[in-house]
Amino acid sequence: MTSAVRVMLGSFGRVALVELEHCLVRHAHPHCHMLFKVGGADSSFIVDDVAAPLTEDSVVLVDAWRPHEFVYRPGQPPTQIIALYIDSDWLAALSADLGDFNPMDFFKSNSGHVSRDAYRILMAVVDCLSGVSPSRMDVEFLLSQLVLTTISRAGAAGHAGARCGRPHLFDWRIRKAVKFFQQNNADFDTIDQVVAEIGMSRANFFRQFKACTGMSPGLFQNVVRLEQAIRLTVVSQETLSAAASSLGFSDPAHFSRFFRNHTAVSPRLYRQGASDWLSR
């Protein structure tokens, strides 16, 4: 298993083969998220403050916008993972037979069992990302089978790791704030502007934002900024210094540190991992 990152984008969202050898800060994604161990040490993620095991037999399942983090224990060997970030439209079509689709409350548990069939498919995905070169359609088919096999095992009943449902964006002022952050690349200087525009006190805004979204405004800003950072790193032809500047980072080193603390690798390696796939 190589420690270099491998990244692939498609209609399914994106998938990354990475090695975890340091902590990942508390963060979230606008996608449903699956984390599979494919090598190295057993470990776990913290999802909504509850440990979810990451082993060959157990996959970590994270709903869209649900905060999670990885705590690395000093001295433990690295853990190699497949991290799958699933496009909501793709997942909705794939899981149409399961009933109503809500990406913020899709998984009924923070963890699921990895069956023998799922593990076989997972290893085929690893082979594809590590050097074997089937067509993009073949890879997407493998990922669809991996997702279907996993969610059919997790099911609606859940099991160990079951958790409560998510808050909902019932306050129009918070919905407006969320839209504003998304339209402004989560500029960290905009909180006071948002608070003034929606007519709330700063303390009440922070309290209501957490109640509606399950995360603080600062954490939500990081979610938006991370997705923009990944887009600029993988899709854009901008230099990484230009990407850092456009996202409001004071210097490239700050940008690289932010990126690595959320994805496990530097933006340079992440871009190289995506380029290696695109160049095939």
Image (cartoon, rainbow, N blue to C red):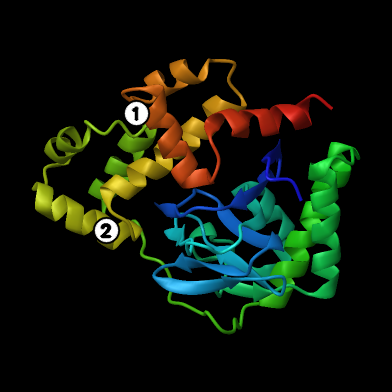
- Left or right, residue 170 beside residue 266: left
Choose between 27 and 241: the one closer to the eye. 241
What percent of the width, then of the height, locates residue 141?
84, 50
Place residue 245 in its image quadrant.
top left
Residue at 41% x, 44% y: name it.
223
Q: Earlier in the sequence, mark 1 or mark 2?
A: 1
What percent of the width, then of the height, locates residue 33?
58, 56
What percent of the width, then of the height, locates residue 142?
83, 53
The image shows a total of numbered marks equal to 2
Q: Is residue 156 above or below residue 89?
A: below
The amino acid on which the numbered mark 2 sits, given as a three-letter code, is Lys
Q: Residues within 10 Å of mark 1 (few under 14, many from 20)?
A: some
| C-alpha distance separating marks 1 and 2 | 20 Å
Which residue in the protein does label 2 denote?
A: 210
Q: Which mark is residue 184?
A: 1
Residue at 80% x, 66% y: name it.
119
- Left or right, residue 90 beside residue 173: right
- Left or right, residue 48 beside residue 235: left
Place residue 82 in its image quadrant.
bottom right
Residue 6 visible here = yes
Place residue 80 in its image quadrant.
bottom right
Q: Identify the secondary structure beneath mark 2.
A: helix
Quadrant location of the C terminus in the rendered image: top right
Q: Identify the secondary structure beneath mark 1.
A: loop
Q: Which mark is residue 96?
A: none
Residue at 54% x, 58% y: name it.
103
